[in-house]
Image: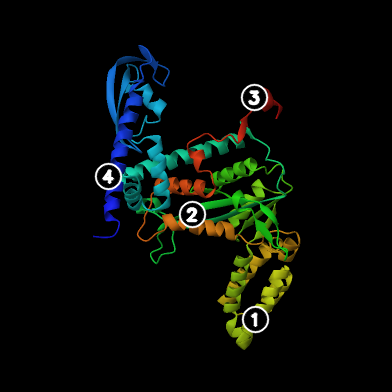
Amino acid sequence: MAEGSDLEVLELAIRTAVTRLGAALLEGLLAADAGYRGPRADCGAGHQAAFTGYRTKTIDTVVGPVTLRRAWYHCAQCRHGLAPRDDELGTGHASLSPGLAKMTARAAAAVPFARAAGLLSELAGIELTVKRVERSAEATGTAAAAAIAARAEAISSRRVLPLPPPDPVPDMLYIAVDGTGVPVVAREAEGRKGKAADGKARTREVKLACLFTQTTLTDDGYPVRDTASTTYLETFQPAGQFGQLVNAEASRRGADHIRQLVFLGDGAAWIWNLAGQLFPAATQIVDLYHAREHLHELANLAARLLAGHRDEWLAARLDELDSGNIEAILAAGRDLNFRGSLSGERNKALAYFASNAHRMRYQHFRDLGMFVGSGVVEAGCKSIIGQRLKLSGMRWTIHGATSIATLRCQDASGNWDQIWQRPRSQTQLTDHARQAS
């Protein structure tokens, strides 16, 4: 017999007894109010539902199953019944208590659903099927995504105004944007072009944004990110809806009060279109490491022309890039005497630098103490999205992927509790103030 096995048996037995006692106590406390609210109650659709008697309902809680006895009302106009007590307890459309739903969402956001069910069983003694874990977590994530979208729409329409940021106001606010593919079921990619040999898409792009500030500079002049300041947003929606989310979060973070906005991204056109539309005064910076990758590709394309001097040619171009001398890179590229289709490839590579030249003044940006890399959002694509939604064999619906990604973004942003309580980060406009604005 393994060491400590007797103790483990005792521990589990006591835990089982304590949770059973807890369930009995909870059931007794809930029985003190059966939810009778008079002979009639509001049905939620503007009608009055009539009291018809009492019905029971069993819900799973963090201490085990509990049976509720609550007053039941029926609306003749709507032809459906309701128990006001269910909504008061947060179990109106669920068979899990709010506490257990929160626990389930935490587990399912961290690991695949089957593993989450196993953790709940092993660590909390709660037995839920994999499908119930999935449904509960996705319902929580869906509600959170809807609340975030509603807040963004309210801020964008100026129905609410963000409160000023706490003093002292950060000097700079960074907005970094990227996208990554998530594997989806066939119907979610139907009719879309992909990179596979058959030309069909297997993934859908999720757009991710992170916003953060910096604390200070190192002795070498490099900025230091305030890790506690980083918030994340995601969506599978088109750039327009994504932009509304980003704009609202920037407003909530105090963009109107901060001296300098900095927008970081790779060379994707949709990112810079978004930046220009929403934050025209922001400093736009192409991620330095993406730019370096493009130079490596150009050097590889020119390897035969450069003969044994490829590495020296590349080193010179990288130095020019670091100093922000894009004109020198363009001149050196045009001097490459390509012929035929290769000249078109060269021109395409040079167009990347020509169109982004003003976003590649890296030495100037460094002199201003700014970040020149979008590593934070790229790391987010890997840790928030990739490590949960892109595991081997996974295929998602957009609904399911959105819900879990939302939970993970809220967790990574330190906003987990905001999923269950209304955030007090904005103020409602009065009619007079709305007219004045």
Q: Which mark is residue 337?
A: 1
Disc 2: which residue: 384
**Mark 2: few, some, or many residues within 10 Å (few <14, many ≥20)?**
many
Foreground tag (2 vs 4):
4
Q: Distance between the residues labelled 1 and 2?
A: 44 Å
Q: Name the residue under label 4.
A: 13
Residue at 35%, 25% (x, y): give it: 30
Front: mark 3 or 2: 2
Q: Position of residue 266 (x, y in %)?
A: 60, 60
Q: Which amino acid does label 2 sit on?
A: Ile
Is 143 or 283 nearer to us in this picture?
143
Q: Residue furthest top?
A: 39
* Quadrant location, the N terminus: bottom left
Quadrant position of the C terminus in the picture: top right
Residue type at mark 1: give it: Asn
**Disc 4 element:** helix
Q: Where is residue 38 in the image (x, y as percent from the top left)?
A: 37, 12
Q: Is residue 398 visible?
A: no
